Image (cartoon, helix red, strand yellow):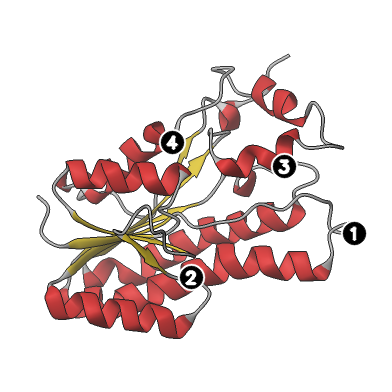
């Protein structure tokens, strides 16, 4: 039963937009955020997930209007290159958005959820955070950290009635796929798809359906789960 607001980061496009739409269909009051607002989407709030003060302001304002029931951390950026190839500036940027942004969101939301004794957080990881993939060092490390952050939070917050789970998408049709088709990476997307049992690109709505389930009462006994939505990528490898 929808009983409050749910903050969704990275909601301008891709998985974040699909998650926002799915939660709205369930009756949640969805607070759609992204790094930049949009005149074409006045419901989209500007939020830099790496800005601790911006998170505090958002949560304080929302709580004055009603309870925060959930947080879905969809915001993230990609990064290609092995650990000795990527620049440290790029490394820091990927970790800043994907890990620090997730941690700051969780910290801010928990300030509202823990005193109330209920709430749900869904972090968006990646299959690359479960099983290593070449040429994605910073991205894979950031998502592996998000996976274990989820488990750690679930253990810490069980007594507070807050559930924390992680969805790990496979190859999903979103703007982040762009670099996988760029110059110098020809064939990378096809190589990745060949390792998915279903042999196709997933759709944002397929990930959003899992996020909506994890926010719902049907998932009331689910916490600390790391759930691939990956077309079978982490199940094994095929020739």
In whole angstroms, how far apart are the C-alphas of marks 2 and 4?
Answer: 21 Å
Residue 185 rendering spot, x and y as whole percentages: 82, 35
Specify the farthest residue to the front: 39
Query: Going from the N terminus, do you reach mark 2 or mark 1 first?
Result: 2
Label pair 3/1, CB-CB below 8 angstroms: no
Query: Going from the N terminus, do you reach mark 4 or mark 3 first?
Result: 3
Query: Going from the N terminus, do you reach mark 3 or mark 2 first?
Result: 2
In front of the other: 218 or 210: 210
Specify the farthest residue to the right: 84
Say if 166 sits above or below 31 in the image: above
Residue sitting at x 29%, y 58% = 43
In whole angstroms, how far apart are the C-alphas of marks 2 and 1?
Answer: 27 Å
Look at the numbered disc 1 and give the secondary structure of its residue.
loop
Reading the image, the residue beneath label 3 is: 179
In front of the other: 103 or 36: 36
Position of 81 compared to 98: left or right?
Answer: right
Name the mark on residue 84. Answer: 1
Name the mark on residue 204. Answer: 4
Pick the quarter of the image with the C terminus: top right
Say if 2 sits above or below 67 in the image: above
In whole angstroms, how far apart are the C-alphas of marks 4 and 3?
Answer: 18 Å
């Amino acid at each position: 039963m929808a009983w409050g607001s749910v903050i969704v980061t990275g909601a301008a496009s891709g998985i974040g937009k699909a998650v926002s739409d799915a939660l709205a269909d369930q009756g949640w009051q969805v607070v759609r955020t992204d790094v930049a607002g949009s005149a074409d989407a006045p419901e989209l709030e500007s939020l830099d997930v790496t800005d601790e003060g911006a998170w505090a302001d958002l949560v304080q304002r929302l709580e004055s209007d009603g309870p925060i029931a959930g947080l879905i951390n969809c915001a993230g950026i990609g990064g290609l290159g092995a650990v000795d190839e990527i620049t440290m500036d790029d490394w820091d940027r990927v970790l800043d958005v994907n890990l620090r942004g997730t941690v700051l969101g969780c910290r801010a939301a928990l300030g509202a959820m823990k005193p109330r004794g209920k709430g749900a957080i869904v972090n968006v990881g990646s299959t690359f955070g479960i099983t290593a993939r070449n040429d994605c060092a910073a991205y894979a490390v950031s998502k592996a950290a998000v996976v274990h952050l989820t488990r750690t939070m679930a253990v810490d917050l069980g007594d507070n009635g807050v559930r924390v789970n992680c969805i790990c998408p496979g190859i999903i049709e979103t703007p982040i796929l762009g670099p996988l088709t760029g110059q110098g990476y020809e064939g990378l997307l096809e190589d990745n798809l060949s390792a998915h049992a279903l042999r196709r690109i997933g759709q944002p709505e397929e990930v959003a359906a899992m996020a909506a389930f994890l926010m719902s009462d049907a998932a009331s006994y689910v916490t600390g789960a790391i759930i691939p939505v990956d077309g079978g990528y982490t199940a094994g490898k095929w020739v």
